[in-house]
Image: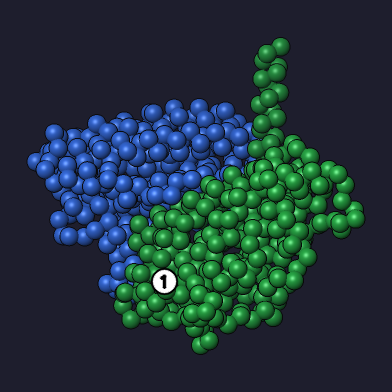
């Protein structure tokens, strides 16, 4: 999920070549597209943007939760959180590898992240202020991500689909861990319960924003759906997320911060308030509460690590040279 | 990616059950229980504080693979902490759990060596510290697998598997960075010079160490020095790094006199337990 507002590069009908038609027929037949096979440039570019944004979201997404690793309240919680954040780094790794099969290197993608040319999910520009946020992020943010990633296991691009299958297994585990933290907090002391409610208040709308604005009229979305890069509309997924999450909040005894939330018998789902889309576009533009810190932390890690990476390369070259000399 | 911490494996329960019934090698009856408790705190606190420092890198490593590897070491060390401090609480016999010991002691009751509490510095300095510690930890655990106390031997056996890998990795990295570029060489030499006197505290024995060695619970520290020197000398030679001539030893950690840094680590680590006493998380 961590892909929002991904621009799709389709052609108009008149521009389509016989290869394009044959390609679309393969996708319609449910075939997987593999790295070395022919694909339209637009398909390749759109996938690079989407997988790249997803990968960036995983590594930037390490930061809000990483923020509490050193303050985790028990040894067990510390281990669970560390393992989770480490999983996210692992997801980043699978996804950068999937993007590499499309002919773009991890370093190129990172450069674009650092320069601001590529984005990551808006959700990670919100702060994690209490321990309950470790529960709410797992429950809501991973929950929202799963909504999108489960269908993406069937996406048309083979490496992306396979990465998603691995990632989904871990994400659903993370979501359960997050919910377990929420249970402890919601059933804990009055302060803990207050922390849990506060976390839900702050993270509810940003979680709804993760699906992106309504895309029912979007041309990009139509093309991406035809290519099976995008499997559902943003609104469909948002609805599904709300329908799934509201009863979970009720079970916790917490109140979803939406006075308009109401079960709609006719549509078989909840009616709910839209998030503040002005806020969303501001966060995307860089005006969110943590944009500068998050990107700054990534750039700092990369810049501070330059000498390390250079040294590892230099050592590998020297070692290879010594081996050649030894062999002669 | 490992998703489940070791603390949740049945292994811990097995250990506890064995401990309750006394193993084939029950603790020597004449072993000084206060000294044994101190020794176990040293084991647990070294793992806890180094694990904490390593975990500070999570999300900030120089390359994704190393970020993951560093978190993995942190995870192993926190897992080992739970086992050592769990046993410490049992030996103490006052009903304190591993969490109580980790989260509710003040700095003067911590028994880790100063080396592990010092700030990370750059990634190379973190790896140098890791290597100097791993080389000690590895030989120490190897000896502890033959401990007269079956509980100690079991924990050591489990930890040794992880630490063998830590040592292999940190040694490789120290070699690569010492050999890599002029800059990386200079950084690693500076890190070694800076940390050497702190590393030597690991061999500074006291009455607690002597009692543990006499009871056959832990090895004589002097016996670990030879194997440590051999490992360290071999790796540093390959890394083209020079062992510092200054052999001044910075001590105090093992007896509870720490650097200023530990207080800040604890202020952060213990915040929730201190701010909300008795809450369950």
Q: Is residue A68 above or below residue A214?
A: above
Residue A225: x %, y % from top left: 70, 58
Residue B101 percent across, percent down from the top left: 28, 59
Residue found at the very far right of the displayed protein: A14
- The secondary structure type at the circle numbered 1 is helix
Quadrant where the N terminus of chain A sits is bottom right
Colouring of the image: by chain
| Place of residue A304 in the rendered image (x, y in percent of width and height, measured from the top left) | 66, 53
For the question of whether residue B61 can be seen, the reply is no
| Relative to B24, A79 lies left or right | right
Task: Looking at the picture, tell me which residue is in the foreground, B212 or A299.
Answer: A299
Farthest-out residue, left: B29
Does residue A97 lie above or below A128 as drawn? above
Is B147 left, or right, of A56 in this rendering?
left
Towards the viewer: B54 or A294: A294
Q: Residue at x 71, y 23 (%)?
A: A321
The image shows residue B239, relative to residue B55, as above or below, that is above
Protein chain holding label 1: A
- In this view of the protein, which residue sits in the foreground, B112 or B173? B173
x, y (%) of residue B140?
A: 33, 36
Farthest residue to the front: give it.
Answer: A266
Residue under label 1, please give it.
Answer: A248
The quadrant the C terminus of chain A occupies is top right
Colour chain B is painted in: blue
> Alpha-carbon neighbours of circle 1 within 10 Å: few (<14), some, or many (≥20)?
some
Report whether residue A248 is seen: yes
B226 w.r.t. B45: above or below: above
> Residue farthest to the bottom?
A259
Question: Looking at the image, which residue is at 48% across and 39% down?
Answer: B131
Chain A drawing hue: green
């Amino acid at each position: 999920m961590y892909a929002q507002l991904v621009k799709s590069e389709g052609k108009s009908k008149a521009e389509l070549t016989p290869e394009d038609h044959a390609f679309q027929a393969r996708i319609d037949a449910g075939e997987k597209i593999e790295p070395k096979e022919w694909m339209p440039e637009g398909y390749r570019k759109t996938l690079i943007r989407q997988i790249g944004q997803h990968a960036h979201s995983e590594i930037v997404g390490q930061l809000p939760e990483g923020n509490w690793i050193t303050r985790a309240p028990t040894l067990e919680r510390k281990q669970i959180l560390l393992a989770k954040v480490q999983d996210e780094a692992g997801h980043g790794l699978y996804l950068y590898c999937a993007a590499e099969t499309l002919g773009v290197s991890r370093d190129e993608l990172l450069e674009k992240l650092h320069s601001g040319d590529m984005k990551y999910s808006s959700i990670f520009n919100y702060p994690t202020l209490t321990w309950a946020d470790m529960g709410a992020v797992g429950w809501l943010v991973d929950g929202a991500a799963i909504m999108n990633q489960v269908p993406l296991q069937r996406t048309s691009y083979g490496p992306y689909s396979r990465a998603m299958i691995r990632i989904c297994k871990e994400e659903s585990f993370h979501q359960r861990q997050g919910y377990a933290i929420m249970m402890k907090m919601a059933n804990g002391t009055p302060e803990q319960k207050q922390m849990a409610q506060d976390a839900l208040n702050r993270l509810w709308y940003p979680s709804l924003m993760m699906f992106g604005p309504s895309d029912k009229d979007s041309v990009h979305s139509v093309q991406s759906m035809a290519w099976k890069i995008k499997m559902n509309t943003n609104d469909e997924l948002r609805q599904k997320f709300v329908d799934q999450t509201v009863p979970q909040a009720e079970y916790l005894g917490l109140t979803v911060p939406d006075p308009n939330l109401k079960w709609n018998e006719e549509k078989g789902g909840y009616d709910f308030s839209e998030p503040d889309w002005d806020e969303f576009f501001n966060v995307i533009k860089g005006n969110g509460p943590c944009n500068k810190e998050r990107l700054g932390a990534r750039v700092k890690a990369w810049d501070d690590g330059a000498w390390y990476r250079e040294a590892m390369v230099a050592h590998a070259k020297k070692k290879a040279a010594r081996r050649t000399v030894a062999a002669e | 990616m490992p998703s489940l911490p070791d603390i949740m494996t049945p292994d811990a329960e097995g250990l506890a059950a064995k401990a309750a019934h006394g193993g084939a090698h029950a603790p020597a009856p004449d072993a000084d229980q206060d000294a044994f408790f101190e020794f176990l705190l040293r084991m647990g606190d070294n793992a806890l504080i180094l694990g904490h420092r390593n975990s500070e890198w999570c999300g900030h490593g120089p390359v994704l693979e190393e970020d993951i590897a560093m978190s993995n070491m942190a995870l192993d060390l926190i897992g080992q902490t739970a086992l050592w401090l769990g046993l410490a609480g049992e030996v103490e016999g006052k009903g304190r759990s591993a969490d109580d010991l980790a989260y509710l002691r003040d700095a003067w009751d911590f028994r880790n060596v100063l080396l592990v509490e010092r700030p990370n510095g750059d990634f190379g300095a973190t790896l140098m510290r890791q290597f100097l510690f791993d080389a000690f930890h590895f030989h120490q655990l190897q000896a502890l697998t033959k401990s007269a106390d079956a509980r100690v031997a079991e924990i050591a056996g489990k930890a040794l598997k992880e630490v063998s890998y830590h040592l292999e990795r940190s040694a490789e990295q120290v070699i690569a960075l010492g050999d890599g570029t002029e800059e990386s060489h200079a950084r690693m030499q500076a890190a070694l010079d800076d940390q050497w006197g702190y590393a030597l505290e690991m061999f500074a024995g006291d009455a607690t160490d002597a009692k543990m060695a006499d009871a056959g619970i832990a090895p004589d520290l002097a016996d670990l020095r030879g194997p440590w020197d051999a490992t360290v000398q071999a790796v540093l030679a390959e890394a083209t790094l020079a062992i510092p001539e200054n052999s001044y030893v910075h001590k105090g950690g093992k007896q509870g006199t720490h650097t200023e840094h530990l207080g800040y680590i604890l202020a952060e680590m213990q915040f929730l337990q201190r701010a909300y006493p008795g809450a369950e998380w």
